Image (spheres, grey):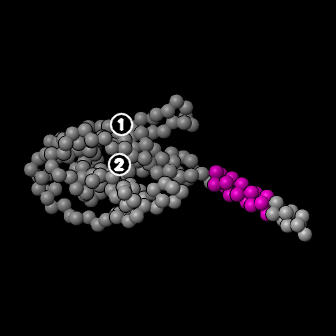
């Protein structure tokens, strides 16, 4: 009886190993989507207090900065993520990422000044979109900033961080700070 029990355990363990291996193979074959990763580097102090603004209120300039008087407040770098099929995310998705983050920060506009390919080999290369956060300094911009609506919290903002697997996670674009999901620009 004892030998049969031992055999059954080995069989069940082998079956479980095959099941885990099959799940792993399916996950690898299906690919893993990754979000665009964004970094922000402050450059100059803002000429006024910044607050979150509606996404559609952020101007987008490509090549040349806006004609209005402004201060370059900081630089965004968006590192291209991958789709579930393994293809790189599109330029429009990268622009949407930088625009969303610039609205969270309170930029009046962004000036996209380049998209570069970084890496040595085609398979290991990625694109990086670089943009400047522009804050206007004219009276019209000051008045408009005073009348910006108070926006609702983002989904998950103010909630606890998901610590699945020992890594603190929040819905994108939020970050985990002291076990609470918050905007990265406070």
Say whether residue 16 is magenta: yes
- In the displayed orientation, state which residue is furthest to the top: 120
Q: Give left or right: position of 9 versus 58.
A: right
Residue under label 2, please give it.
98
Mark number, residue 167: none
Crowding near pointer 2: few (<14 within 10 Å), some, many (20+)? Answer: many
- Of residue 100 and residue 24, the one placed in the foreground of this image is 24
Please say whether residue 8 is one of the residues in the magenta stretch. no
Magenta stretch secondary structure, dominant = helix
Tell me if residue 173 can be seen.
Answer: no
Q: Residue at x 45, y 39 (%)?
A: 127
Q: Position of residue 100 (x, y in %)?
A: 34, 54
Provide the residue span drawn in magenta.
12-29
Disc ID at residue 114: 1
Q: Between 172 and 10, which is closer to the camera in this rendering?
A: 10
* Residue 80: percent from left, percent from top: 45, 44
Quadrant in the picture for the N terminus: bottom right
Q: Nearer the viewer, mark 1 or mark 2?
A: 2
Please identify the residue farthest to the left as the structure is shown. Answer: 139
Ranked by sequence position, the earlier of labels 1 and 2 is 2
Q: Secondary structure at mark 1?
A: strand
Q: Does residue 147 appear left or right of residue 115 in this picture?
A: left
Residue at 82% across, 60% down:
10
């Amino acid at each position: 009886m004892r030998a049969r029990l031992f055999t059954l355990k080995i069989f069940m363990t082998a079956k479980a190993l095959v099941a885990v291996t099959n799940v792993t193979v399916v996950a690898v074959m299906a690919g893993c989507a990754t979000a665009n990763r964004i970094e922000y580097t402050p450059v100059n102090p803002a000429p006024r207090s910044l607050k979150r603004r509606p996404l559609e209120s952020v101007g987008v300039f490509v090549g040349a900065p806006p004609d209005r008087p402004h201060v370059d407040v900081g630089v965004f770098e968006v590192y291209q993520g991958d789709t579930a099929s393994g293809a790189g995310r599109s330029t429009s998705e990268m622009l949407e990422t930088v625009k969303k983050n610039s609205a969270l920060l309170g930029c009046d506009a962004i000036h996209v000044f380049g998209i570069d390919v970084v890496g040595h080999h085609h398979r290991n290369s990625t694109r990086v979109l670089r943009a400047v956060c522009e804050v206007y300094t004219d009276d019209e911009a000051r008045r408009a900033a005073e009348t910006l609506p108070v926006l609702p919290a983002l989904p998950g903002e103010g909630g606890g961080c998901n610590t699945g697997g020992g890594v603190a996670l929040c819905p994108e674009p939020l970050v985990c700070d002291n076990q609470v999901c918050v905007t990265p620009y406070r």
